[in-house]
Image (cartoon, helix red, strand yellow):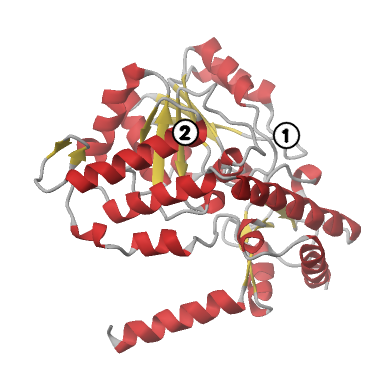
Amino acid sequence: MDKRITEILDKEKNRQSDTIELIASENFASDAVMELAGSIFTNKYAEGYPGKRYYNGCEHMDEIENLAIEELKKLYNCNFANVQPHCGANANTAVFQAFLKPGDTILGMDLASGGHLSHGSKPNISGKIYDAYSYGVDINGFLNYDGIRNKALKVKPKMIIAGASAYSRVIDWKKFREIADEVGAILLVDMAHYSGLIAGGVYPNPVEYADVVTSTTHKTLRGPRGGIIIWNNSEYTKKINGAIFPGTQGGPLMHIIAAKAQCFIEANTDEFKEYCSLVKENANHMCDIFKENDIPILTDGTDSHLILIDLSSKKHSGRVIADILEENGITVNKNGIPNDPRSFVETSGIRIGTAAETTRGHRRNWFRELARKISKIINE
């Protein structure tokens, strides 16, 4: 290996080992997942799908992709799955292409309220190609389902997108289904942040209610960096698969698909279910300490791995606090809050997640002490 690369790799190993990792979208994959992500599967082109490849020599690629599909279907109790998306945003883009035409109306969660760029944000392709509208949260940070319904009745979207990247509470998938049915919209659920917790049985499964579900495979699912699409209606299979290949992607990353298969197998165990319970418990322990130290939390708590701290009444912005925490060996990310008084560059929030450090084996008292340290830094 080139010495320059080795030096950078070693520095990153040291950074990860010496840092407390609280970024809610990050986790630590198992050795088996990482070994497969760097395996000889990376050497093979496998454009197409199992049994219908454009290259010869794909018999073992078919085996590993079929295994990943079957394990994914078992994990979320669904009928159909595509494991080829390179990331969650690619999965969303493909679903848009499968069901929408340029200029069609979509309705997704506002970025400032906790939504994701790929749900119709103006700088993103989803906000450029489609006529994108957004819904938000109430004054306490909770999803306002009456407001979402009223917005849907007004703009008549062809697709409604549920899911978030900075919303800590349970999302009522059934209410979204009812709203979508009332306006005749397709319901896409992006469960990227919650997919591990859903697999672990500690957060509601949207598969029963959504037309299509997308996710990443890292974050709480603790797999390689990649995406997935799952659904139950056989009539959607051809259009979804075609929207991934050849619609929006070329050759699948077979080494990542192999790592996904391992991730799905790991997630379908009692050990993983126990891990997910601890992730939620640890997040709630941190919330208890933040409240004791007068640190405002959006929605006054959490139902997941995620905590969004409101710094609008504090001296420092989210950017400054994130930088100070990093100087103290704690990695978080700045995050906007609803009706943020500061700019998107500064923000008035920080987002915290407990998934990664729970993977490292930390428990109640460790997280409570960490929350005290963070509280002291914020209140200084």
Mark 2 lies on residue: 74
Q: Secondary structure at mark 2?
A: helix
Residue 88, given in percent of the width and then of the height, sits at: 42, 45
For badge 2, the amino acid type reads Lys
Answer with mark 1 or mark 2, whichever residue precedes in sequence. Answer: 2
Count every numbered label the image shows and give the total: 2
Write the residue at 34% across / 54% down: 256
Left or right of 87: which side holds 41? Answer: left
Mark 1–mark 2 distance (CA, rounded to whole Å): 36 Å
Q: Is the residue marked by circle 1 packed among few (<14), some (14-19), or many (20+) residues within 10 Å? A: few
Q: Which mark is residue 104?
A: none
Asked if disc 1 and disc 2 are in contact, CB closer than 8 Å, the reply is no
Write the residue at 31% across / 88% down: 3
Write the residue at 56% across / 15% down: 153
For badge 1, the amino acid type reads Asp
Q: Is residue 3 above or below residue 207?
A: below
Q: Is residue 17 above or below residue 175?
A: below
Q: Is residue 220 visible?
A: yes
Name the image quarter holding residue 361: bottom right
Of residues 235 and 128, the one drawn nearer to the viewer in this rendering: 235
Of residues 146 and 92, the one drawn nearer to the viewer in this rendering: 92
Residue 9, given in percent of the width and then of the height, sits at: 41, 79
- In the rendered image, which quarter contains the N terminus? bottom left
Residue 218, given in percent of the width and then of the height, sits at: 48, 52
Mark 1 lies on residue: 138
Write the residue at 27% across / 85% down: 2
Left or right of 173: which side holds 33? Answer: left
